[in-house]
Image: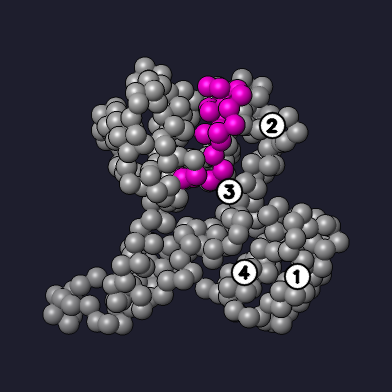
Amino acid sequence: DERVLNVPNKSKHNGILTKEEIYENLNLCLNSCKAIGCHVSSISVKDLQKGSPFAVHSIVWELILIELLDPIDISSCHELSRLLTNNENIDCFKTMAKSEILCRWVNFHLKNQNPKTTKLVSTPGSNFHDCEAYVILLNQLFPNSFPLSILTDNLDYENRAKEFLNIFHNKFPATVKYISVEAISNENYLTSLAFLASIFSIRHGLKKLTTVEDTKIQNTFQPVFESGDVDIRVYGLWMNSMGVDPPVSNVSENLRDGLVLLQLFDKMQPGIVDWKKVYTEKPVSKIKSIQNANYAIQLGRQNKFSLVGIDGTNIEQGNATLTIALVWQMMRHHI
């Protein structure tokens, strides 16, 4: 809300903001970033006051990725269900990181071009240094514009990348240049993630669902609003802003083994979690998940949270109401 910003006023301090007003603005900036899911837990207001290049660069990249990765969501792009394997269901995507979904999308098109290929990608940037994955992906999406002959022109990797990017930017001149030849050669994670997301937003190339298929997927999603007008996505965004691993995409499902909750406590109060008491080896069994969750609830009570009637079993079973009750108090305590 721009009304809470401190803006220069000629009738006050000669139109110059005071140090306190600048601090308030920067603090508002950081809190706003956390609210939309940016990972800025390692950045302080003092870092921004000093004009730290690392802090500014990190925030800008986080904002870019938040915008670019927003469409990579099966709740808004039901065609992503085409990427599911035979033994998976929609819930798998609800708990999957968006970078992982993008890699699966790339691999889908790589296999579509050559079902026997073993050269797949595991993370954005990996196996992209020779530009082969980019060329095949774009060839699948825009066959008339990105010929596979780029791969057989006897070019070294650097010149291949130059030719590929030249074709890409001529085809899409309005697209922001997220990636460079150097970034491709160095398999830069962030620039590759941004580049892949920008390609997905242009065209994902997945077959459109039938009305029956689309309705079936739509019915698997629960309303995002709980407890009146509170949007539970805010809690997930806050947790992701704290840098939890893996990122949270479903507030109740992703917290069932208690590990994300304990990560949050440790980031809120470094050292409070005795990790020797935590079961971290995945997959965490049901009993050990309950023990982890009980430990998280114990830490909550230690911080004087109101957790009457909540125990580890509720968390492990994915009880959304009781899980959110804990997360809400954690977020309030932190912010």
As measured in the structure, the alpha-carbon distance from the residue carrying label 4 to the one carrying label 2 is 32 Å
In front: label 4 or label 1: 1
The answer to which of marks 4 and 3 sits earlier in the sequence is 3
Residue 272 location (% of width, % of height)? 66, 80
Residue occupied by mark 2? 85
Q: Nearer the viewer, residue 196 or 290?
A: 196
Residue occupied by mark 4? 264
Provide the secondary structure element on which disc 3 rests: loop
For the residue marked with disc 1, what is the amino acid?
Answer: Val
Magenta segment includes 20: no
Neighbor class of circle 1 (other Cα within 10 Å; few <14, some 14-19, many 20+) is some
As measured in the structure, the alpha-carbon distance from the residue carrying label 2 to the one carrying label 1 is 32 Å
As measured in the structure, the alpha-carbon distance from the residue carrying label 4 to the one carrying label 3 is 18 Å
Question: Do the numbered discs 4 and 3 sit on residues whose CB atoms are within 8 Å?
Answer: no
Residue occupied by mark 3? 97
The answer to which of marks 2 and 1 sits earlier in the sequence is 2
Q: Which mark is residue 278?
A: 1
103 on left or right of 311: left
- The residue under the point 45% across, 50% down is 189
